[in-house]
Amino acid sequence: MIKSVLDKHGYTYMIDADGDVVGNFQGNLIYFFQIGDQGEMLQVRAMVQHIFGMEDVTRLYEFCNSWNHDRLWPKAYVHIQDDGTVNIIGEVLADWEKGVTVEQLDQVMICGIATGCQLSDATATLKQRPSTS
């Protein structure tokens, strides 16, 4: 169903080595994970394209706290990679234990894509301001 929703909108995507669906939306990788014991939850995870350093972590936490206070979607958090680079991840999650219609799936996926790109746009402004740490 995930692929059919993306196809309906004409979006380009691929299936990664783990079988997860991922697309590039305005330079951001957005994954569509089926999670839960029976794959009953959909997690739309936006990995924003902007990369930061460890010196930016404090202000990134502050940014995410402010973002999450003011918005429902996506929930934003800071992710520190093994190589010391830092980025922000956005997440929209839906639990469909009792089932889902194509229309419901479409709405959550489009919400995850659109708000993930909005999060990336907001994160870009952080790239333009040097760290004060």
Image (cartoon, rainbow, N blue to C red):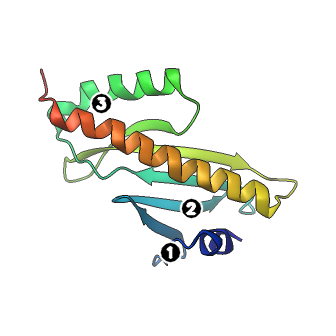
Give the vertical position of 89 relative to 55 (above or below). Answer: below
Instruction: Tell me which amino acid carries mark 1.
Output: Asp
Question: Mark 1 to mark 2: distance in Å?
Answer: 12 Å
Using the image as rendered, state which of residue 4 and residue 31 is in the foreground: 4
Label whose residue precedes the other's in the sequence (3 or 1): 1
**Where does the image place residue 11, in percent across and percent down from the top left?**
52, 71
Left or right: 127, with 34 as reference point: left
Residue type for callout 2: Phe
Q: Which mark is residue 32?
A: 2
- The residue pinned by badge 3 equals 60
Tell me if mark 3 has few (under 14), some (14-19) or many (20+) residues whose alpha carbon lies within 10 angstroms of its own. Answer: many
Label 1 vs label 2, nearer the camera? 2
The local secondary structure at tag 3 comes to helix
Residue at 50% across, 61% down: 31
**Quarter of the rendering containing residue 110:** bottom right
Residue type at mark 3?
Answer: Leu
Which residue is under mark 1? 18
Q: Mark 1 or mark 2, which has the lower sequence index?
A: 1
